[in-house]
Image (cartoon, rainbow, N blue to C red):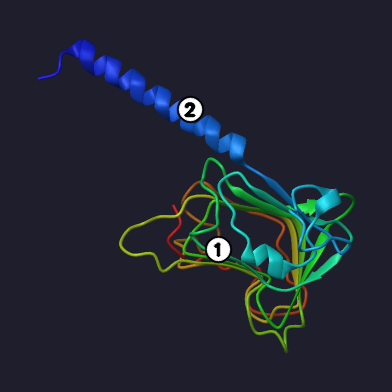
Amino acid sequence: MLSGRRVLEMKRIFLAIAFVLVLSLQASATDYYVSKQGKDSRNGTSPATAWKTINKVNSADFGPGDSIFFKGGQSFSGNLYFDETKTGTASSPLTIGSYDTGRATINADNGKCIFVYNTAGVDIINLNCVGSGSTANTSDGILFYSESPGDLKHERVYIDQVDVRGFGNFGVCPRRFLCEPNGIPRREGHKLYASRQHEGGFHDLCALARYA
């Protein structure tokens, strides 16, 4: 049987290892940039070596603490997709937003602007999401959807300064959320702000899923 001193030593070692892992994770976080003047053959890790397309973003790997910044004032065609293989955590979220002056616009045409599947740990800040119109586009603007088994809860959904328009269904929809009658999640750790849908559809915010 381990003595009290030995147990204390093991706890200290465990905490030291955990601390090193956290520092390593933070150190490995990377900012990626996307610009109409960029090239997908570049590494994307600075404005001078920015990527060009959403297809490149969707094909890349991301981890906790990474950020994806689209150049403000520019429009990018496509549909962003993130699943459990490329996302952040509650303490080190993946951030999607704009850089330089103004907001970038994601032109989703008849699809979803941003689809986050079976995961969370995602911050979406300072973006415009535009569909082809509430008649032509019957999809959601930003959709968080979980089919994770059992009682698994996904932590952290943060959306702020995001303008959503041109989608016939929901502007922002974390599907299968437990929510209040006004659509705001009962659980803490999620903030969903400034989502507006300008061309009809059902609701600005749908909250119907399993997110802690």
- Residue 158 seen from this side: no
Q: Residue 99 has which mark?
A: none
Direction front: furthest residue:
41
Q: Nearer the viewer, residue 6 or 148?
A: 6
The image shows residue 192, relative to residue 40, as above or below, that is: above
The image shows residue 95, relative to residue 150, as above or below, that is: above
Which residue lies at the image location 66% right of the left edge and 70% below the top edge?
A: 171
Which residue lies at the image location 44% right of the left edge and 61% below the top edge?
A: 178
Question: Can you identify the residue that label 2 sits on?
Answer: 20
Residue 152 lies, in percent from the top left, at: 36, 57
Q: Amino acid at mark 1?
A: Gly
Q: Amino acid at mark 2?
A: Val
Question: Can you identify the residue that label 1 sits on?
Answer: 183
Q: Quadrant of the N terminus?
A: top left
Q: Earlier in the sequence, mark 1 or mark 2?
A: 2
Q: Is residue 189 left or right of residue 47?
A: left
